[in-house]
Amino acid sequence: MDQIVLFGDSLTQLSSHQNRGFAFNAALTDAYIRRLDVVNRGFSGYNTSQALSVLPRIVTPLTHTSRIKLFVIFFGANDARLPDTPGPAQTVPLEQFEENIARIATYPALLQHAPKILLVTPPMIDEYGCEEDDKTRDIHVTRRTADNTARYAEAIRGLGKRLNCPVVDLWKAFAKEAGWTEGSEGPLPGSKQLPRNEVLKDTLNDGLHFNPRGYEILYKEFMKTVEKDIPELRPENLPFVLPTWDDASWPR
């Protein structure tokens, strides 16, 4: 079976969990069942520098048995953590982040597969939720901000143009749900400069990671992007790899 590979951090890893309800990875697997295998290669806590270090173990040279048809790159939530804050270092400066994503997308062993590359922006965060979660870890300083995460989302948009890759703009999808519109002035939803945004509170379970509502938004935006930019990979445009049980070609 050819593959869709989801390469990302905890937002990817946890997309297989169904303990709260809707799960992105499960929904995608169902959409592509018998057409493409969906492979979850999410690594909780990883930034793009760590992603590069494990990439040779994620993408192997092309064999005759399977090909990566779609490679999804979804990092930034950890890279965008503020520098010099408590806990093991995760921050990757913006320019280095852009370079790391570009290196992943152009990795020679990956290009052997001739896949479509799909970039996903980091989503909006909820500073209130992040702060509450950090306090449970006895951390009492701000480690993530809505403004800084927005810069990393913008970097992914720019990379999409630079690399000619479609982008799932999850940041804007979350922003739309939260009531923000393009060109709005003032603090961003999720910022502590505003009252807590109830939509983001409902979408994110700790200010960063997704509730089912967040994964539903991701799934809808993902499928919308595939339909618009990679229509040949829409599930309905892909045949089953093996025939159905009642196919006339089966021996009787």
Image: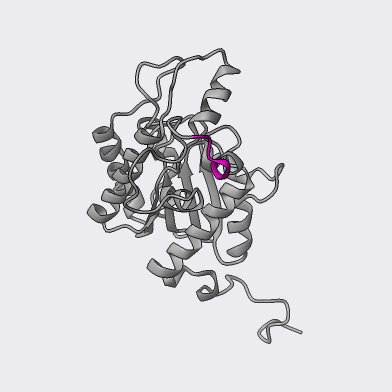
Q: Residue furthest bottom?
A: 248
Q: Residue 212 or 135: which is nearer the viewer? A: 135
Quarter of the figure that contains the C terminus? bottom right
Q: Residue furthest right?
A: 252
Residue shown at 31% from the left, 50% from the top: 157
Residue 198 within the segment the image draws in magenta = yes
Residue 99 x %, y % = 25, 39
Q: Is residue 238 left or right of residue 120?
A: right
Q: Residue 10 or 60: which is nearer the viewer? A: 10
Q: What stretch of residues is rendered in magenta?
A: 195-200
**Quarter of the view holding residue 135:** top right
Residue shown at 44% from the left, 38% from the top: 57
Is residue 65 visible to us here?
no
Residue 13, relative to residue 80: is it above or below? Answer: below
Residue 213 x %, y % = 61, 49
Residue 94 x %, y % = 28, 34
Residue 233 within the segment the image draws in magenta = no
For the image, the number of numbered tags is 0
Residue shown at 32% from the left, 57% from the top: 165
Quarter of the figure that contains the N terminus? bottom right
**Quarter of the view holding residue 56:** top left
Q: Residue 129 or 242: which is nearer the viewer? A: 129
Q: How is the image coloured?
A: one colour
Is residue 110 visible to us here?
yes
Residue shown at 54% from the left, 56% from the top: 219
Residue 67 x %, y % = 45, 58
